């Protein structure tokens, strides 16, 4: 399990990537009008630690960001996804991108080289900007993001309405998809429906596709539809699934059950 000092954790994550103990699960993004229609499937990083327990990469993001590992993990998972896309020509997948993968020059050069090398797969990949970009940073990276779009990749803003995500930052970046943070559909306020409709309306001014995340109940699904969302994502729409494991060493963590399919390097190489 990932316990102990920061240096030990740093070594654990680095070794997991070197050993191929990093994979991904996915969750579908559905059309709100026809749930059987899948726009694409968002990929989430999964790491098998030295004890064989599957850990969500998302739970380690603050540490990886502080240690400068997040951009390397972004590229690692994107590379795995390219391998999967090359073998499955009918699917479309989405990958998360941290702010530092875009805003820091060295990381950006490595990322762009990877994306350019696999540009033939661009029409089947959505790049989700996962972190909240402050407005000055959003303005700085707008041209870089457009250069990726020119290769054929679709760009999504994730968790809109949370943290630094503002209307100014949204309209500063050329995007194809806006994903509304789950908070706006899950809050229990008398004005929640009006607030969600406002957020969806604002997002629709920036992109033709608006996804409401965090759909866990039928009531939330109806709220997203009434608000004008084009697509929805959440556990209500994705069945729980066990992991595919490498060998016999890995075991499912008892602390959490994950939803979505899971892919490991051995499945695509």
Image: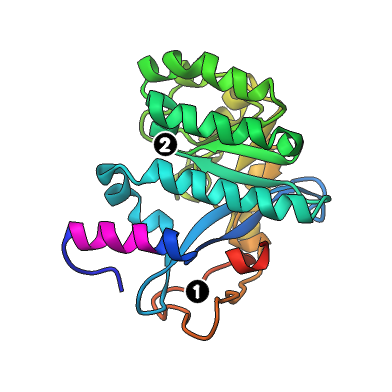
Is 66 contained in the magenta span?
A: no
Q: Is residue 12 magenta?
A: yes
The x and y percentages for residue 169 are 45, 19
Can residue 233 be seen in this snapshot? no
Q: Is residue 245 above or below residue 31?
A: below
Which of the two residues, 135 or 167, is positioned nearer the viewer here? 135
Say which residue appears at 43% left-offset and 28% top-offset.
165
| Visible residue check, residue 51 | yes
Mark 1 vs mark 2: which is more N-terminal? 2
Relative to 138, 157 lies left or right:
right
Q: Secondary structure at mark 1?
A: loop
The answer to whether residue 199 is above or below residue 24 is above
Q: Quadrant of residue 112?
A: top right
Report the coloring of the rendering: rainbow
Locate residue 234, reporting x and y percent: 60, 56
Q: Quadrant of the C terminus?
A: bottom right
Q: Judge left or right: residue 41 versus residue 249.
A: right
Real-space CA distance between mark 1 and mark 2, rounded to the nearest whole angstrom: 25 Å
Write the residue at 34% across / 46% down: 69
Mark 1 — residue? 257
Q: Residue at point 23% right, 69% down? A: 3
Q: Toward the viewer: 87 or 225?
A: 87
Question: Mark 2 sits on what residue?
Answer: 131
Magenta span of residues: 7-15
Secondary structure at badge 2 equals loop
- In the picture shown, does residue 206 fall above or below 39? above
Furthest toward the left, the residue is: 5
Q: Residues within 10 Å of mark 2 (few under 14, many from 20)?
A: some
Taken as a whole, is the magenta stretch helix, strand or loop? Answer: helix
């Amino acid at each position: 399990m990932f316990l102990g000092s920061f240096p030990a954790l740093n070594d654990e994550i680095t070794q997991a990537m070197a050993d191929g103990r990093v994979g991904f699960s996915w969750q579908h993004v559905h059309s709100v009008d026809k749930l059987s229609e899948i726009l694409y499937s968002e990929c989430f990083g999964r790491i098998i630690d030295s004890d064989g327990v599957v850990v969500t990469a998302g739970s380690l993001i603050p540490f990886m960001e502080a240690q400068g590992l997040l951009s390397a993990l972004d590229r690692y998972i994107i590379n795995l996804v390219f391998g999967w896309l090359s073998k499955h020509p009918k699917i479309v997948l989405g990958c998360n991108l941290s702010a530092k993968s875009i805003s820091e020059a060295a990381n950006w050069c490595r990322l762009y080289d990877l994306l350019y090398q696999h540009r033939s797969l661009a029409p089947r990949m959505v790049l989700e900007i996962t972190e909240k970009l402050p407005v000055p940073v959003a303005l700085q990276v707008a041209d870089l993001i457009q250069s990726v779009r020119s290769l054929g990749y679709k760009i999504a803003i994730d968790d809109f309405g949370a943290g630094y995500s503002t209307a100014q930052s949204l309209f500063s970046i050329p995007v194809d998809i806006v994903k509304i943070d789950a908070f706006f559909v899950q809050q229990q306020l008398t004005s929640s429906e009006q607030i969600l409709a406002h957020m969806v309306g604002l997002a629709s001014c920036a992109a033709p596709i608006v996804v409401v995340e965090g759909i866990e109940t039928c009531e939330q699904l109806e709220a997203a539809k009434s608000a004008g969302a084009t697509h929805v994502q959440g556990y209500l729409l994705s069945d729980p699934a066990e992991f595919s494991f490498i060998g016999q060493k890995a075991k499912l963590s008892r602390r959490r059950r994950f939803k979505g399919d899971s892919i490991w390097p051995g499945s695509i190489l």
